Image (spheres, helix red, strand yellow):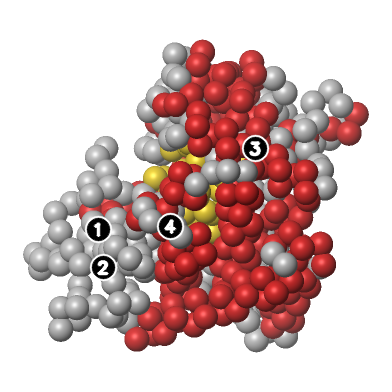
Amino acid sequence: MTDRPRPAVTDSGIPVEPVSRPPSGEPPPEIGEPGAWPFTRGIHPQMYRSKLWTMRQYAGFGTAEETNARFRYLLSQGQTGLSMAFDLPTQLGLDSDDPLAEGEIGRVGVAIDTADDMARVFEGIPLAEVSVSMTINAPAAVLLAMAVAAAERQGVPAAALRGTVQNDILKEYIARGTQIFPPGPSLRLATDLIVWATEHTPKFNPISISGYHIREAGATADQEIGFTLADAIEYARSAVARGLAFDDFAPQLSFFFAAAMDLFEEAAKFRAARRLWARITRDRFGARRPESMMLRFHTQTAGNLLTAQQPDNNAIRVTLQALAAVLGGTQSLHTNAKDEALALPTEDSARLALRTQQILAHECGLAQAVDPLAGSWHVERMTDEIERRALGHIEAIDRIGGMARAIESGHVHREIEAAALRTQRLIDAGERVVVGVNRFQEGAGPEPALFTLD
């Protein structure tokens, strides 16, 4: 299967212009051209016309062998990148035989205790060809070392390894809670990995600065962008303080966002994030290379918006969320399975989630035009407003003294909790409709077939 979409015409034979522009021919400077400053319209001139986004389904459970089988199955079905979930003990730096690990081994991801485990996860998977994303934070350096060792066993040098390690410890204090050490030492370890990877694994992103978990905790779209970019500023300052030139490591900074249900707000959010990051890199860090100013990001559809009630509806939700991510110009995408509010996905539901991406890529003309929402009065106004509000969050954090201090002061937690409470009150009052939950309910239907762990 090729990455290239079909010829750029509609089903009726109407030619599709690669990039639409206003009648004057010159877009406003704050919108610009695709692949050019300030990157509102995308980081590549042709976007998906030249290469589709990476279809990177998040997977991992049980043993290394079981996860390897799921990886190989997804690749055989047309997935184009791997995204690796680790179990909770691994995320907390615990071996599977630690008493604290009991009951959690392999439940929310794969159990990795040794370099041999990592080698078994990738057995038969050519690491010279397939990029790997690893969702690991506090012990990120250890797991990356294991991945490098697994690649070297295949004859793939560290310098050729492609992928991403999350390594975003600040958002653990904000939204997830799998930190091991206090903020200061944790930030130092995250920076150590950035410094090492800049020299030794230039094709591997040493950090994925993650707004996804912030959004899942209840943040709004503008909070997600503002807090995530404030995290990025903190990491960049730390790396520069260690002696790295910003332009040397900035092109390998990557980001991770959620795609929620408000289609146009979400597409505008991604456009606003690109533009705001371009301005931050230029004005705060003196970036000179265009690659240093480009915000490259992975997107996952919103897990917290999946419902246990009427789970088939989740396939529709995921499709709309994925559509928003692609309209917003994501570089890679995970689509949740419809049964993930109830259990880990079955093989069938994981395949359907992947097929959702493939249909968007190949059947609906979505990849033919670059930033097709550009020029919409609604979307451009929304893009401007999200950027304005996100910048306000960043400036408030600046006044506190940066993200590390904002986390310690409780500022970020208070902001997210207030937003989450407002949303829940709207749902409880029926003012925000969730189909099958507070409207259009049904009686208990047949139990779906769920995935079970041995």
Q: Are marks 2 and 1 in contact (CB under 8 Å)?
A: yes
- Alpha carbon separation for disc pair 1 and 3: 34 Å
Residue 192 numbered tag: 3
Between marks 4 and 2 in the image, the one whose residue lies nearer the viewer: 4
Between marks 1 and 3 in the image, the one whose residue lies nearer the viewer: 3
Q: Name the kind of residue labelled 4 in the image.
A: Ala
Up-down relation of residue 153 to residue 37 (above or below): above
Residue 432 in view of the camera: yes
Residue 263 in view of the camera: no
Graded by Cα atoms within 10 Å as few (under 14), some (14 to 19) or many (20 or more), the crowding at tag 1 reads some
Q: Name the kind of residue labelled 2 in the image.
A: Glu
Give x and y (percent) for residue 7. Answer: 14, 54
Q: Name the kind of residue labelled 1 in the image.
A: Pro
Graded by Cα atoms within 10 Å as few (under 14), some (14 to 19) or many (20 or more), the crowding at tag 2 reads many
Between marks 2 and 3 in the image, the one whose residue lies nearer the viewer: 3
Q: Quadrant of the C terminus?
A: top right
Graded by Cα atoms within 10 Å as few (under 14), some (14 to 19) or many (20 or more), the crowding at tag 3 reads some
